[in-house]
């Protein structure tokens, strides 16, 4: 079994646990963009995205005393991030009850994304995917996560990650055909 | 796959190198032997390649500082803010080196004692016959409108454009600045307009070096006119009398209070940041042009302004945390001051705090532009944005540019102008709104 305690980021977190906060800033600097990206594709607008990143890191910091390295640090972090997003969107849309549907909230069309200048059909298509497929795509393509790590974060079997990924690609292809044929 | 025959369900796993060695070999074998399967795999590969090229979202340069502050405030730690001082100093220094000073302040209204009587505020914009015919749409609609609105004596007259003639000097200075900022002062169609404006201002200089009527708020008119003439002189060798500029600068120096700021004249008033920003800008330009040799009055002014700032770096009106008209315009003014100061006596932690506050202000404007329409504030914001050069703020600047463009009149008699329907518009009038919006847009482009 892998000894995660030797991983660099885990070492940083253990240092934070001992009170050395400069390592917390290293964690923040390393992962803030990844988290912002995740929240962006979970349909947070720019301000919400930054707020969620802040909240995620705050939760990590508050959890420091209880932290034990049982997985890669990124797995631990992204699990907290996803839960932070679920809590946030649950509050935003209090009537929704299922996790899967909480993150299905469509992007606010009046809130332009901060990627607007670079927006293309593929990015639009990703945001149209059901959240269960979108999360898999984002973690795999933008975070280079292995299926096993994605499975751990989402708490689903690896086989489910594999099938979701395949379904996602098929749906993306269909959406792209739709967009590009209607140009 | 469990070593069965590979199917389309395995394609993503194959592309992500998630198949076992045995399954991978089986997969590759099928690709070789099954043309239809190969086609499907190719389609997946094509999309896979495109997905891998999508860039991640850009984070704000300030996000680390925001996060650390948030954790500091809510995570039970006393002090966590660290680092990036060198980076911020480098940003500030490079910005100042590359841009120089570009402060333009207008404050026909940003003062506790309203510079326009209530009767004037109620007065509406009169359509000047010279501006009543629309020209064909051009790239320079705003300048064309200003050109049409100019009176034969070279002035933009307050009485004709929704405010009072006591502000004619200030409005003329603003309009002159619009031509200079848009970098169009040397275009043949505008040269005469610009020269007439310069001529009007210099003819309206008093013996003591001041511009405009000797009212208590004279320093607004004076500061705007001085900045405009200095910039005209600095940007191109305009026919601006050096002697007139020297006298104007001398007037500013003689009006500086012991604290380092400037106040309303003709009354016992304490200095305020709104009037002072104009005078400070004039002195900075005078220093740049070689008319002012000493840095002392500039530094004294900056030190005084620094003392007025709150814990987020927002400079108060007359004292710290004094915001008689709200914080919006003062946040914008502070942006200009901080970016001047940080290259010299920078307090880097305060600068970071201020940049966060500044970004929040921008985000509020972008989120609710109708509630935050304030061309006066926009000018300072856009001047400061020219120097901040931060990723997130760059995209916010584009949004501000869109807001300004959307509000410009696209047809009719007032083609190219901006309705004076912003926060200060009812007092400033159409020349104010148009000149300020033009300068702001020029700063963003």
Image (spheres, coloured by chain):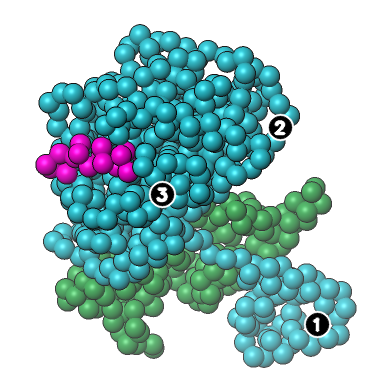
Are there few (<14), some (14-19), or many (20+) residues within 10 Å of tag 3?
many
Residue B194 against residue B91 in the figure, above or below:
above
Q: Are marks 2 and 3 on the same chain?
A: yes
- Chain at tag 2: B
> Which of the two residues, B156 or A150, is positioned nearer the viewer here?
B156
| Front disc: 1 or 3 | 3
Q: Which mark is residue B102?
A: 3
Answer with mark 1 or mark 3, whichever residue precedes in sequence: 1
Front of the two marks 2 and 3: 3
Q: Is residue A54 above or below residue B127?
A: below
Chain B pictured colour: cyan
Alpha carbon of mark 2 to alpha carbon of mark 1: how far? 60 Å
Pointer 2 with pointer 1, Cβ within 8 A: no
Numbered badge on residue B137: 2
Q: Which residues are magenta?
A: B245-260
Magenta highlight on residue B324: no
Question: Percent from the top left, x then y, of residue A82?
Answer: 42, 59
């Amino acid at each position: 079994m892998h000894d995660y305690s030797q991983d660099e980021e885990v070492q940083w977190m253990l240092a934070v646990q001992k009170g050395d906060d400069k390592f917390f800033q290293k964690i923040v600097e390393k992962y803030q963009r990844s988290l912002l990206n995740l929240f962006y594709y979970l349909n947070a607008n720019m301000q919400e995205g930054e707020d969620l990143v802040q909240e995620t890191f705050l939760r990590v910091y508050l959890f420091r005393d209880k932290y034990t390295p049982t997985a890669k640090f990124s797995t631990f972090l992204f699990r907290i991030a996803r839960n932070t997003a679920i809590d946030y969107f649950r509050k935003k849309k209090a009537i929704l009850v299922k996790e899967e549907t909480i993150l299905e909230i469509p992007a606010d069309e009046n809130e332009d994304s901060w990627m607007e200048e670079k927006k293309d059909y593929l990015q639009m298509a990703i945001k149209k995917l059901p959240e269960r497929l979108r999360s898999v795509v984002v973690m795999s393509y933008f975070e280079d996560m292995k299926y096993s790590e994605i499975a751990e974060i989402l708490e689903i079997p690896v086989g489910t990650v594999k099938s979701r990924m395949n379904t996602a690609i098929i749906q993306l292809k269909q959406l792209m055909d739709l967009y590009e044929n209607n140009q | 796959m469990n070593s069965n025959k590979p199917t389309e369900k395995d394609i993503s796993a194959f592309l992500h190198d998630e198949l076992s060695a045995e399954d991978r070999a089986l997969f590759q074998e099928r690709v070789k032997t099954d043309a239809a399967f190969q086609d499907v795999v190719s389609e997946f590969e094509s999309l896979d390649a495109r997905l891998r090229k999508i860039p991640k979202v850009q984070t704000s340069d300030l996000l680390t500082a925001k996060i650390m502050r948030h954790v500091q405030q809510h995570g039970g730690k006393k002090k966590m803010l660290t680092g990036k001082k060198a980076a911020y100093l480098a940003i500030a220094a490079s910005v100042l080196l590359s841009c120089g000073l570009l402060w333009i302040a207008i404050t026909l209204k940003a003062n506790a004692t309203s510079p326009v009587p209530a009767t004037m505020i109620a007065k509406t914009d009169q359509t000047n016959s010279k501006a009543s015919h629309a020209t064909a749409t051009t790239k320079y609609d705003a300048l064309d409108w200003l050109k049409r609105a100019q009176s034969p004596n070279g002035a933009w007259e307050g009485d004709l454009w929704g405010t009072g003639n006591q502000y004619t000097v200030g409005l003329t200075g603003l309009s002159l600045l619009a031509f200079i900022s848009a970098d169009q002062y040397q275009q043949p169609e505008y040269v005469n307009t610009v020269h007439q404006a310069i001529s009007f201002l210099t003819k309206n200089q008093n013996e003591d070096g001041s511009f405009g009527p000797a009212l208590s708020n004279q320093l607004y008119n004076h500061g705007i006119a001085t900045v405009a003439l200095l910039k005209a002189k600095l940007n191109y060798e305009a026919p601006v009398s050096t002697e007139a500029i020297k006298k104007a600068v001398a007037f500013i120096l003689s009006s500086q209070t012991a604290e380092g700021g400037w106040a309303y004249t003709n009354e016992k008033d304490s200095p305020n940041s709104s009037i002072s920003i104009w005078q400070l800008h004039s002195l900075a330009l005078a220093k740049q042009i070689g008319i002012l040799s000493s840095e002392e009055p500039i530094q004294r002014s900056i030190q005084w302004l620094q003392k007025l700032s709150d814990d987020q770096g927002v400079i108060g009106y007359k004292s710290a945390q004094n915001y008689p008209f709200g914080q919006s315009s003062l946040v914008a003014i502070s942006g200009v001051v901080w970016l001047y100061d940080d290259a010299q006596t920078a307090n880097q932690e305060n600068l970071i705090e201020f940049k966060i506050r500044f970004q929040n202000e921008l985000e509020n404007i972008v989120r609710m532009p109708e509630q935050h329409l304030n061309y006066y504030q926009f000018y300072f914001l856009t001047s400061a944005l020219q120097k901040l050069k931060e990723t997130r703020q760059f995209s916010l600047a584009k949004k501000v540019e869109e807001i300004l463009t959307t509000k410009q009149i696209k047809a009719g008699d007032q083609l190219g102008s901006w309705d004076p329907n912003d926060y200060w518009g009812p007092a400033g009038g159409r020349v104010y709104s148009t000149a300020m919006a033009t300068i702001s847009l020029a700063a963003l482009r």
